[in-house]
Structure formats: C-alpha cells, structure tokens
Image (tube, rainbow, N blue to C red):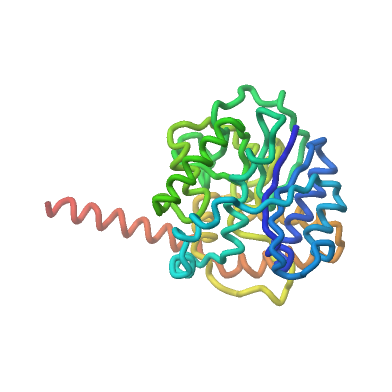
C-alpha cells in the first residue's frame, strides 16, 4: 500500500519538524511494509543544490519515492492568502506551500485507487495494509481533530485514506474556491477547505489510526499523531510558560500527561539518537510544570453560573 507525505524544503531548516520526520520514516520502515512516497517542493529555501538539502538526503536514505512537485494553483492561492492575511494567521508562505501540496497527490498517483496520506509528525507502530480497512471510502476516511469519540463533524486531515478519484474532484473544487477568492470558513489553510469540501461526506476511521498522545496510552494504536504539543529537541528552546491549549487538553483528558511522556519517549527512540531521550523528556517535564488544567475547570464553572443567572433574568 502506498503512503504519501507532502512538504516543502522549509522543513529542512526546522529541527523540531526535521526530527519528527526522521522518527516518522524510521518507524514506518521498522514497523510496516508501506510503499513510501513524498511530494517534495524544492524552492531553494536553504540551499541552492537539492543534493545538499537535508530533507532530500533523508528521503534518499530511507528509500522514499521522491516526486518533485510544486502546487499548480499557487497564483490563486496567494490571492486568498495575502501577506496581510498570512501575518494575521501567523503562517509563513513556506508553511502554506507544505500544507496545500497534499492536493497534488492525484496529479502524481496514476496507478492505485486508494492511498494513505500521513503528516510528517506521526509514528507508525503496526503494519498497515489496504485489507485492514473494513470498508473503502467513496471520498476519504479520517479521524477526529481533538475529541476521542466518533461523534464529530470536523476531522483531522493528518491521516487520510484517500479515494483518488474523489480527491481529484476535491482539488478542482478547491481551485474554484481560490479563483473566487473564497476563504475556508472553519479554519486557516488546507484542513479548513478539506472539511468544507467533504462536509457530511466522509467516512470515519477507527481512532487508532490517528491516535493523539493526550488521549493517553493505547497499546492498540496503529498510528500516533504528535498533534498539538510537539517534542522539543533543543533544551535551550524551552519556554517556561502556561500554554492554554495544553492545559485544556490536560483538563479534558486525565491521562494526557502520561500519554505525552510515553509517546514523546517513543519519538526520541525512533530518532535513533541516544541523547535525544533525556532532552525531550526534560523539556516536556518543564512544560508540564507550567500548566494549570484547573483553570479550565474554574472557567467552566463560572460560565455555567453566569448562564444560569442570565437565564433567570430573561
């Protein structure tokens, strides 16, 4: 079964994302027989010669099929994502290219009806074959964004089982939206558009295919997505601060802390560098010390109290 990644060369100069991709490729090679493919947009961001680019070198090392691709709807994309809007969203153009590059998969894939797409911050823990899926989608099969349930309307696009014919149509619809300078309503970038294009028309994968560390430890997890909080690989990069979404996830998921320590340790192992383990876990410990999940408990109690008071006044 083919598995596609997509990224531009800006990742080459980002240690956090570079090492996550190392762990992704290493885990895929060790635990699966997936036929790995990568759409790579080389824009000479860091080096002039592609052979000197460390993401390109990584892809060669792990024998990934490399497809040098640039999005063919860039002009339309930049009319929507102006410099002013990108600044507002805190998104760089390079990051934008990486995000939308996945829409080029049907331009490259000409053989298979179904392929797997994966973000470059996942860990493959068990074998994956097309026969493992109890049903094959007419569109895409996905998992939820944050909640560990099957009662959701918005999905996370970090893992997708893609029907190529459907995805080709989705790309055409995306281009029409961009031509008309229509922004995604749900959220910034590609995932917002995907949720709109496939609204009420997607299949739900078992959550073990896109398991999040903050849901806790799951021995049945097939793919773990290092979603949200990323493993820090440089101790000097640690910021001792309260991170609202991390604290909220800890409040909503009592086992979040254990899950992060377990899967970040696993990430460090798959980088293949012995020194990575203590660095990553020390960074995580410092981060956890700064969080205050009780804040969200208090916040919700206040909101409920105000709602009751305001309700009585009506």
**In the foreground, 173 or 213:** 173
- Which corner quadrant holds the N terminus? top right
Q: Is residue 71 visible?
A: yes
Q: How many numbered markers are drawn?
A: 0
Q: Which quadrant of the figure has residue 111?
A: top right
Name the residue: 48% across, 69% down.
83
**Seen from this angle, which residue lies furthest left?**
314
Residue 311 in the image: state x and y as whole percent.
18, 51
Residue 16 in the image: state x and y as whole percent.
70, 64
Name the residue: 66% across, 30% down.
114
**In the foreground, 85 or 223:** 85
Residue 276 in the image: state x and y as whole percent.
81, 64
In the rendered view, would you say 107 is above or below 185? above
Residue 210 in the image: state x and y as whole percent.
63, 41
Name the residue: 44% across, 70% down.
84
Name the residue: 47% across, 49% down.
192
Q: Which quadrant of the figure has residue 273?
A: bottom right
């Amino acid at each position: 079964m083919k598995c596609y990644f997509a990224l531009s060369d800006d990742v080459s100069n980002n240690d956090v994302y570079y090492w996550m991709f190392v762990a992704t490729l290493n885990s895929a090679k060790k635990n699966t027989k997936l036929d790995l493919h990568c759409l790579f947009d080389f824009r000479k961001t860091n080096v002039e010669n592609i052979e000197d680019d460390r993401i390109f070198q990584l892809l060669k090392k792990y024998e990934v099929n490399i497809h040098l691709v640039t999005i063919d709807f860039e002009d339309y994309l930049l009319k929507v994502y102006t410099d002013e809007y990108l600044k507002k969203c805190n998104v760089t153009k390079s990051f934008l290219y990486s995000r939308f590059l996945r829409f080029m998969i049907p331009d490259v894939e000409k053989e298979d009806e179904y392929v797997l797409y994966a973000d470059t911050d996942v860990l493959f823990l068990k074998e994956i074959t097309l026969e493992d899926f109890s049903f094959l989608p007419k569109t895409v099969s996905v998992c939820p964004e944050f909640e560990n349930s099957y009662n959701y309307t918005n999905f996370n696009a970090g893992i997708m089982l893609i029907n190529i014919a459907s995805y080709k149509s989705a790309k055409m619809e995306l281009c029409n939206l961009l031509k008309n300078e229509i922004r995604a309503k749900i959220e910034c970038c590609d995932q917002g558009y995907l949720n709109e294009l496939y609204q009420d028309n997607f299949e739900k994968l078992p959550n073990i295919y896109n398991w999040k560390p903050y849901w806790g430890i799951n021995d049945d997890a097939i793919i773990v997505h290092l979603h949200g909080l990323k493993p820090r690989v440089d101790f000097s990069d640690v910021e001792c601060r309260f991170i609202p979404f991390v604290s909220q996830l800890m409040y909503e998921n009592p086992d979040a802390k254990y899950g992060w320590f377990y899967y970040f340790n696993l990430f460090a192992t798959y980088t293949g560098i012995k020194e990575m383990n203590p660095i990553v876990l020390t960074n995580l410990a410092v981060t956890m010390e700064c969080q205050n999940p009780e804040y969200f408990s208090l916040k919700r109690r206040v909101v409920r109290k105000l709602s009751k008071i305001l309700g009585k006044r009506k």
